[in-house]
Image (cartoon, rainbow, N blue to C red):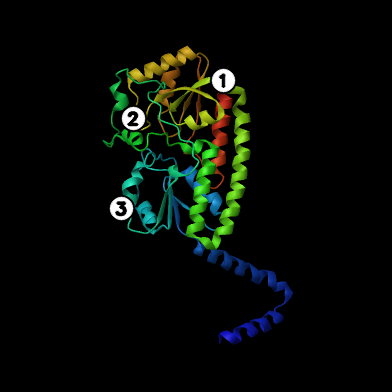
Amino acid sequence: MKRALGPALKTLARRIPAALAPALAIPALLFAGSMRAADAPLVVTSIKPVHSLVSAIMQGVGEPQLIVDGAASPHTYNLKPSNARALQDAKVIFWVGPGLEAFLEKPLQALGSDASVVELDNAPDLTKLPFREGGAFEPHDDGDAAEHEKASDGHDHAADEHDHGAFDTHLWLDPMNAKAMAMMITTTLVAADPANALTYQANAKALDDKLTALDKELAATVAPVKAKPFIVFHDAYQYFEHRYGIRVAGSITVSPETIPGAERVSEIHRKVGELGATCVFAEPQFEPRLIDVVIEGTRAKSGVLDPEAATLKAGPDLYFTLMRGIADSMKACLSSA
């Protein structure tokens, strides 16, 4: 039967009118596309910025799954049963590391599968910056006990972040770090799925070129305002600051899991007053009322920064939207301050 099938199909093809060929070709293409998607490895990613980089490299092969979706924050996320199932079924899992996604550490250690678990904070050529102590980025000795209280779940996540390598884990806020992570992502995907290696490598080259262009664009965007100091909700922007020479003067809270005490708020309020006309930036998933308290009675303006892409739709373009959004928000607020 198999030998006779080829000639029979050729005979049938000669009898099909030319006008019907395009219509018959569409289902064939859809079938081929579904076969390609079915062959793609199941890849799971932790947060939106990581998902965006992986999505860009996997375009044309498959779509990675995302754990921390919507407006959720990795600082406070609780793993869902559907997330646990995805981790168990995954062939490759990408996360930044336990300093950021502490909720993933134990589930990944207990994983019963042979999945490749890739901790991107181990990528070669990453720039890693140490944590800065205190909301004003000074040794924090003002006795404000509320700054060191545990999160509502009773666990001291801030201590976790310091225990796991003592570096700031918002690594993706420097496009050069995004390049380094993309290289590690590509190497991992090629090893896990060599059949699609050429696609991964071509996508990675295109992504690297786009990141080079983005870096130049961001530098130009913030150049007019980079000498103006400003206050952020929590100290998540050190890599952006380091890359582009901007001046973050302090943060309202040391850790996003804890509500700052009255003394901390008063301290930052005084600092805003000393700085004069400046900007204080909120974040979409945290309490905006604190910003109003901090700038009350001062000449400061308020803005919003979204370092973890809480308000953005997941996908391959998210990383670029995220980074441009930060630069544009800084420029808009500081230009009018």
Query: Which quadrant is the C terminus positioned in?
Result: top right
Q: Nearer the viewer, residue 42 or 291?
A: 42
Assess disc 1: are there few (<14), some (14-19) or many (≥20) residues with their C-alpha within 10 Å of its C-alpha: few
- In the drawing, what numbered circle is on residue 110? 3
Location of mark 2 (residue)? 258
Left or right: residue 231 versus residue 11 is left
Q: Residue furthest right?
A: 18
Q: Amino acid at mark 1?
A: Ala
Q: Residue furthest front?
A: 125
Q: Which label's residue is closer to the chain start, 1 or 2? A: 1
Q: Amino acid at mark 3?
A: Ala
Quadrant in the rendering for residue 72:
top left
Left or right: residue 213 versus residue 261 is right
Q: Position of residue 27 (x, y in %)?
A: 60, 69
- Observer-side mark, 2 or 3, equals 3
Location of mark 1 (residue)? 227
Left or right: residue 332 versus residue 281 is right
Q: Position of residue 235 (x, y in %)?
A: 43, 28
Q: Nearer the viewer, residue 135 or 70?
A: 135
Q: Amino acid at mark 2?
A: Thr
Residue at the image point whose x is 32% and y is 22% from the top: 261
Question: Do the residues under discs 1 and 2 have CB atoms within 8 angstroms?
Answer: no
Q: Position of residue 226 (x, y in %)?
A: 57, 23
Q: Which label's residue is closer to the chain start, 2 or 3? A: 3
Q: Which label's residue is closer to the chain start, 3 or 1? A: 3
**Vertically, is 103 above or below 221?**
below
